[in-house]
Amino acid sequence: MEVSKEKNLVIEGKHKKPIVADIIFKDDGKAKPIVIFCHGYKGFKDWGAWDIMGDRFAEEGFFFVKFNFSHNGTGPDHLTEFLNIEAFGDNNYVKELDDLQSVIDWILLPDFKFAQQIDASNINLIGHSRGGGIAVIKAAEDKRIGKILTYASVSDFGSRFPEGKKLEAWEKKGVQYIVNTRTGQQLPHHYQFYKNYKENKERLSIKKAAKKLKIPHLIAHGSSDTSVSIGEAGNLFEWSPAPKLLLVENADHVFGTKHPWNGEELPKEFKHVIKKSIAFLKTDSKELWDEYGESDDD
């Protein structure tokens, strides 16, 4: 059976910007485990091979959801371009956590159009890069999450902000710019991003959240990742109570994929990650906990 796709569904978020989502699933009327994918910084749901990834999960019997964070700079009319740069500048980690909550709540609404297709008791999160940190925090906060998978994830948000004179200059100007290497665009970060982080520092500690997890955690990271150090995977492995580490030899930050991605075939590194992810999701949580979790004697 071919997979069905519903693209660009608009979810009302808490922050006056639409959250645009895709769902991919086999329309067989069976209740399926839910997998929600969170993109990373300067990412979006239609980036590179994320669509093919969704197909693979759907083919294996999962109800796959991917979405754009409301302030990622894209919009319903420009899904792969950062034309809404003011929204990009107004983004912060708390907004992304709120957006992810809105997506989870939307799927679990009693009148959700595809309620027959989902197993509401089996919700799993995948986060790539910065989205990995968001997924870890949300999984620690929301008891409905059954498993978490992080791909090339960051392990700390605070260390990514400037310090000293650079921070002072940012506060004074109110904005700093980052170049999007893919498009050459100058994208703004308003000072509220840092202020919001400081105000919510405890909640936004990935370390604290990871240590609180009571669910199995697959940590996938490429050995040749130059964007997020492999040491960050080591941190998550150290902190998570039931971690499984998947180090992918010679893989970069996006496991050999790029944007745009043409063709149906995936690079072997990403195929490997997806295969291991599906096996992890199909394994009973208790079994995973028994194998990878901390025993009472630790």
Image (cartoon, rainbow, N blue to C red):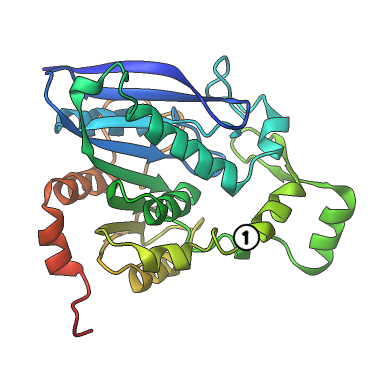
- Within the image, what quadrant is residue 213 found in? bottom left
- Judged left or right of residue 234, residue 199 is right
Q: Mark 1 highlights which residue?
A: 160
- Judged left or right of residue 285, residue 160 is right
- Judged left or right of residue 248, residue 162 is right
The picture places residue 186, in percent across and down from the top left corner, at 73, 37
In which quadrant is the N terminus drawn? top left
- Picture layout, residue 31 above or below residue 40: above
The front one of 251 and 206 is 206
- Picture layout, residue 97 above or below residue 222: above
Q: Is residue 49 visible?
A: no
The front one of 114 and 258 is 114
- Judged left or right of residue 288, residue 273 is right
The picture places residue 201, in percent across and down from the top left corner, at 61, 62
- Picture layout, residue 283 above or below residue 183: below
The picture places residue 293, in percent across and down from the top left corner, at 21, 69
**Residue at point 27% right, 26% down?**
264
